[in-house]
Amino acid sequence: MNDAVFVENQYQFLDGMELSREMPKSAQVYEILRGAIIDMKLRPGVPINKELISTKLKVSKTPVSEAVSRLEENGLLEVFPQHGTFVPKIRKSDVRQGAFLRKALEVAAAREVAEHVSGAQLDQLNKNLRYQESALAAGDLEDFHTRDEEFHTLICRFTGYPRLPRLVDGSRGQLDRVRKLLLPDPNRPAETIKEHKQILDAIKRRDPDAAASAMKNHLDKVPARLEQLVLQQPEMFEVAN
């Protein structure tokens, strides 16, 4: 298989995709590529072909370049001068840094929301938790992962700080790759729901300290499993860190 055919095959997941006219194209391309990297549809070592992406998504190169730049900034792509842009292997140091930043932001968010949460916001969080349980009961781990991310996004959004969800998103790129690799763990999804319930219960009680503590406990679980994951899937990680 020559290089051109290899690259073409790596981007088959884009076939048939259509972008919405209601959202900025660069934001949509970013979410598509980010999801593909985290889901391992674009695996470590795959080159980023802006022209091919533009062709498949039927957009100009500008939104693709903007999305790629943002992914580079968030550590999900790596530029090698005169060679190109590639999906990197996972660096343990990046995962730890992402976990640190995410914890700082989301623990503060949980505390803030517990102090000011509204009834309507509690309804949304309760509904999300029911969706998580339904997805897990159906064995739909993809939907469960989506609802898991939504739970955290809702808490960030409910702080009233509009930049916070994007800041958290930017901090956790490499961390989310690890979270996705851990998803098939038969115990982790049920543990996640239990931890989410503890966070939500503290928010319902309007207990900022308990909400912050529950969020910290929840977010500490992924980095704690990092070394075990490196042993299980060493091909996904850079050896030197």
Image (cartoon, rainbow, N blue to C red):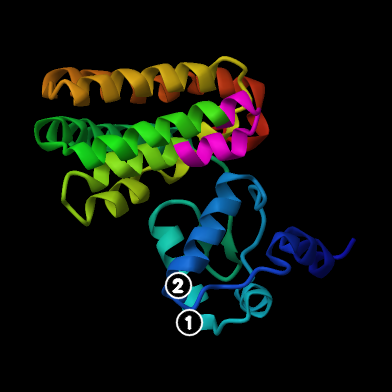
Q: What element does badge 1 sit on?
A: helix
Q: Which residues are magenta?
A: 135-147
The reply to whether discs 1 and 2 touch (Cβ–Cβ < 8 Å) is yes
Classify mark 2: residues with Cα within 10 Å, few (<14), some (14-19) or many (20+): many
For disc 2, the marked residue is: 26
Say which residue appears at 71% left-offset and 63% top-offset: 11
Find residue 230 and report its horizontal and vertical position in percent. Answer: 58, 25
Where on the picture, by quarter, is residue 3? Answer: bottom right
Residue situated in front as seen by the camera: 152 or 9 = 152
Which residue extends farthest bottom?
60
Q: Is residue 241 visible?
A: no
Which residue extends farthest left?
115
Look at the image and say whether residue 77 sits in the magenta stretch.
Answer: no
Identify the amino acid type marked 2.
Ser
Left or right, 147 with reference to 108: right
Along the polypeptide, which appears first: circle 1 or circle 2? 2
